[in-house]
Amino acid sequence: MAAIIDGKEFAQRIHDFVRAQVWQIQQDAGQGSVPGLATILVGEDPASEVYVRNKGRKTREAGMASFQHRLPATIGEDELLSLITELNHDANIHGILVQLPLPAHINSDNVINAIAPEKDVDGFHTRNVGLLGSGQKAMLPCTPLGCTLMLREHFGTLKGKNALVIGRSNIVGKPMAQLLLADDCTVTIAHRYTENLIDHCRQADIVVVAVGKPGLIPGHWLKPGAVVIDVGINRIIQDGKTILVGDVDFASATTIASAITPVPGGVGPMTIACLLYNTLTAYCRIHQRPEPEETGFTLAQGIGQLREFREAS
Ligand code: NAP
């Protein structure tokens, strides 16, 4: 049976680390100085409302400031761009997140590229995309970053692994492939027109699936011992109840894979944890403090700092 990669537990460790770092910032810079994250939700999509609410709650639990902006679906692009300009200049805000998708009359690229790149904690701005693609220091997109951290922890090193990324969206598939390439994997990217997907699956030591189709990948497509990261979130009705499932047929995959992320409890919690981590990183860059990685960030160190934090508070 496959090991279950516990994204919830890993996310909690990152969360604890961020919380301890925020506490350290308050010791150094005064109580009023904390990283601040602004979220913008346009319209009333129920799933987006849940995501934004959870992001706000987790931000506050980490000791950071959360500023939530809710705008009607009818808002014009110019008005949205003005709000972003205001947030770009607000010294209390270090991260800006625009919840996607936006209504069809708003051009998402214009909106994302209006965010100051140093506050682009989703890592979607063209500048950050270019920095990642050219191997330079970028703000990394949260979901692919979370997947990469789980894979690194599982394998130690990803060097030389055959990795298959299924899905090529700008927010998951493409940056995921870039990160795996940066970790010296041999990467294949599959999409809707990929022929014989099963053959690509059979070759892959790592399979990251980000499509949005339940049951797309059955267990018998996998190479025995493969590690599977299931990014998909699909709502299906089972026994009269709505449940969440991924893109991989979990029951059959666990009999072939060596490790797999569950849905829920895998990639989802890691995405939010990485958003907090990115907001902390943005604060450090803006205030020219050593970034978490430059301080030799390890999770063990994070836990140590948390203990100090608990004892002090
Ligand atoms: P998206 O923009 O709709 O992209 C889906 C991708 O899947 C596209 O590249 C598409 O190919 C490809 N695809 C569609 N059918 C396929 C098939 N039969 N075989 C192979 N590839 C196929 O979706 P997304 O935003 O990347 O999200 C993907 C899934 O991840 C969704 O379920 C979403 O809810 C979930 N998600 C989860 C998190 C999290 O935190 N857990 C975060 C983000 C997204 P083409 O490009 O050829 O159309």
Image (cartoon, rainbow, N blue to C red):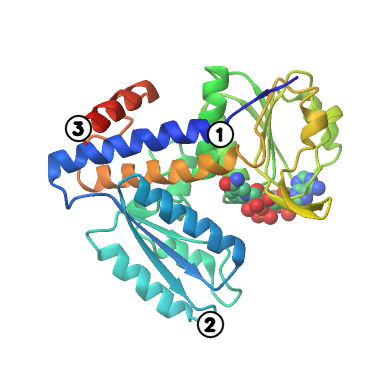
Horizontal arrangement in the rendering, residue 168 relative to residue 273 (left or right): right
Residue position for label 3: 312
Query: Which of labels 1 and 3 is toward the front?
Result: 3
Inspect the image, locate mark 1, and give the three-letter code of the amino acid beneath it. Answer: Gly
Regarding mark 1 in the picture, which secondary structure is present there?
A: helix
Residue at the spot x=40%, y=73% of the render? Answer: 81
Contact between marks 2 and 3 (CB within 8 A): the answer is no
**N-terminal label among 2 and 3:** 2
Residue position for label 1: 7
Q: For residue 40, what is the image quadrant?
A: bottom left
Regarding mark 2 in the picture, which secondary structure is present there?
A: loop
Inspect the image, locate mark 2, and give the three-letter code of the amino acid beneath it. Answer: Thr
Q: CA distance from mark 2 to mark 3?
A: 48 Å
Percent from the top left, x then y, of residue 131? 43, 43
Percent from the top left, x then y, of residue 152? 53, 24
Q: For residue 241, what is the image quadrant?
A: bottom right
Residue at the spot x=32%, y=39% of the render? Answer: 19
Residue position for label 2: 74
Horizontal arrangement in the rendering, residue 43 relative to residue 247 (left or right): left
**N-terminal label among 1 and 3:** 1
Query: Which of labels 2 and 3 is toward the front?
Result: 3
Horizontal arrangement in the rendering, residue 292 relative to residue 225 (left or right): left
Q: CA distance from mark 2 to mark 1?
A: 37 Å
Q: Is residue 309 visible?
A: yes
Picture layout, residue 23 above or below residue 113: above
Inspect the image, locate mark 3, and give the three-letter code of the amino acid beneath it. Answer: Ala
The quarter of the picture where the N terminus appears is top right
Regarding mark 3 in the picture, which secondary structure is present there?
A: helix
